[in-house]
Image (tube, rainbow, N blue to C red):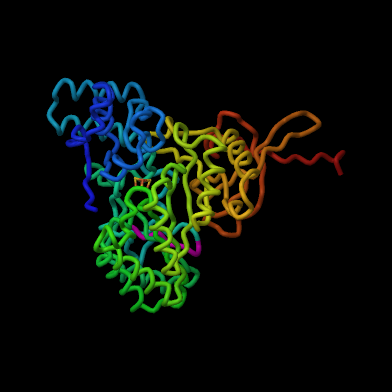
């Protein structure tokens, strides 16, 4: 099976595009000037229900529509395209809009560490025990998700990418930080790299013999967007990839594939089940995560079905995230109160092994803030969110529940007002 990619230039060649009205194709063209668009033959031919494309989660996950930009921004780009402005002028307009879309949420740039006084531009180190590595060759994806919080990684014109190739420097950084135990290969999608390229990184890590490195993770959406990465009968490099996984686990390093699934429809093809079985046969575990997304998975039924299916297929539900405030988040965001309701309605009906998931969590500037509950004061009816940091820049601040004033419209922690605790003498 050969991958065939569609982009803004050739997407009209997709056979199913004939089913869509012209204005829908124009919207894809206009929005793609600002937000990256990419699809492939597997997503187009096997995942999308084209007869119901308007509500199909895999279509909305892949093809942009005009509501993903602010109305004024959409009209500005549409005007530039219709007017036939030269490409560099359209790019200038697009870049102004991109920079207004909060390209680096949660102060990610402050997570770039230094080694011997020099920054490591392809590393983020926010939490004590784990570092993120952005290998240069892995900063693209098999297809692009419309909601993607890493969208600036794919926009060359902006020069906002985190990336580097120098894994020996990453190893040295690990050596100098004994509390680091986990290395997460991320992107983009590191599984877009050939096994030979990943192997070079892994062999350098093996040679470095880092006593404190206990876990390697690969964050990937390949099980959804291109499961053939792990299917030797369709892809001649797949066995090499599986052998590489086995070499990692044989070294005694825990290997965790952080699989991104946004909807159970992405698990419907038997190729996914086969890929999961092949990965697990190498000794690797697969943990699953997704943001909660309006128009795609904002229902308890979707999450409960997805988590139960994941367990049945041999995966471990791990995180439900709140969509980050970046890119087209206004289209996808779900208020925290609604998110908590969806989570609790879903988790109540799942099998016990699906209850491993941590949810709903915001990857905020200080750390991962989890909405633990909504509490009502029986004396005056006032409501509060109970929140805790399950990860924090300062690990000693984790697992300390605190209250924030309830706001049924708030979609992020910084929109909530803290509760001032006042103790009156009469209370003592
Ligand atoms: S696979 Fe991940 S990094 Fe790639 S576009 Fe989708 S969400 Fe973004």
Occupied quadrant, residue 300: top right
Give coordinates of residue 399: x percent, y percent: 63, 54
Q: Relative to 161, is 394 on the left or the right?
A: right
Image: magenta residue range: 128-134
- The reply to whether residue 155 is in sight is yes
> Which residue is depicted at the point 46% across and 57% down?
126
Occupied quadrant, residue 91: top left
Give coordinates of residue 128: x percent, y percent: 50, 63
> Which residue is depicted at the point 30% across and 67% down?
239
> Which residue is depicted at the point 35% across and 73% down?
205
Q: Is residue 54 above or below residue 137?
A: above
Give coordinates of residue 186: x percent, y percent: 37, 56
Residue 308 vs residue 82, the one in the foreground: 308
Q: Is residue 424 above or below residue 178?
A: above
- The reply to whether residue 121 is in sight is no
Membership of 133 in magenta stretch: yes
Residue 341 vs residue 82, the one in the foreground: 341
Q: Is residue 102 above or below residue 142?
A: above
Q: Relative to 156, is 111 on the left or the right?
A: right
Q: How many marks?
A: 0
Residue 210 vs residue 190, the one in the foreground: 190
Give coordinates of residue 333: x percent, y percent: 47, 34
Residue 343 vs residue 270, the one in the foreground: 270
Membership of 280 in magenta stretch: no
Q: Relative to 166, is 356 on the left or the right?
A: right
> Which residue is depicted at the point 30% across and 60% down?
135
| The C terminus, quarter of image | top right
Q: Relative to 326, is 240 on the left or the right?
A: left
């Amino acid at each position: 099976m050969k991958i065939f990619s569609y982009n803004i230039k050739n997407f009209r060649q997709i056979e199913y595009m004939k089913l869509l009205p012209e204005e829908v194709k124009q919207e894809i063209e206009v929005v793609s000037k600002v937000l990256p668009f990419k699809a492939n033959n597997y997503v187009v031919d096997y995942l999308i229900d084209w007869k119901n494309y308007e509500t199909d989660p895999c279509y909305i996950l892949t093809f942009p529509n005009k509501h993903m930009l602010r109305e004024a921004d959409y009209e500005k780009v549409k005007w530039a395209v219709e007017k036939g402005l030269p490409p560099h002028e359209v790019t200038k307009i697009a870049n102004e809009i991109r920079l207004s879309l909060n390209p680096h949420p949660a102060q990610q740039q402050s997570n770039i560490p230094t080694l011997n006084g020099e920054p490591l531009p392809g590393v983020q180190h926010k939490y004590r025990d784990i570092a993120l590595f952005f290998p240069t060759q892995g900063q693209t994806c098999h297809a692009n998700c419309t909601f993607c919080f890493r969208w600036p990684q794919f926009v060359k014109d902006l020069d906002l990418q985190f990336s580097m190739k120098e894994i020996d420097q990453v190893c040295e950084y690990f050596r100098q930080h004994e509390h680091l135990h986990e290395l997460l290969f991320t992107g983009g999608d590191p599984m877009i790299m050939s096994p030979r390229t990943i192997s070079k990184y892994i062999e350098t890590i093996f040679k470095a013999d880092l006593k404190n490195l206990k876990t390697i993770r690969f964050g990937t959406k390949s099980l959804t967007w291109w499961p053939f990465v792990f299917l030797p009968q369709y892809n001649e490099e797949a066995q090499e990839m599986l052998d590489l996984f086995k070499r990692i686990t044989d070294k005694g390093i825990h290997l965790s594939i952080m699989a991104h699934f946004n909807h159970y429809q992405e698990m419907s093809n038997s190729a996914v089940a086969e890929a999961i079985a092949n990965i697990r046969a190498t000794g690797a575990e697969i943990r699953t995560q997704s943001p909660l997304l309006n128009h795609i998975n904002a229902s308890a039924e979707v999450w409960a079905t997805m988590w139960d299916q994941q367990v049945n297929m041999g995966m471990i539900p791990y995180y439900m995230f709140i969509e980050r405030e970046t890119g087209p988040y206004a289209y996808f965001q779900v208020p925290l109160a609604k998110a908590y309701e969806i989570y609790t309605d879903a988790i109540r009906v799942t099998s016990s092994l699906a209850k491993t998931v941590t949810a709903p969590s915001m990857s905020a500037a200080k750390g991962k803030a989890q909405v633990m509950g909504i509490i009502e004061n029986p004396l005056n009816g006032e409501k509060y969110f109970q929140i805790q940091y399950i990860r924090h820049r300062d690990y000693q601040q984790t697992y300390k529940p605190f209250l924030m004033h309830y706001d049924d419209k708030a979609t992020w922690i910084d929109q909530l007002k803290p509760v001032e605790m006042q103790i009156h003498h009469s209370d003592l």
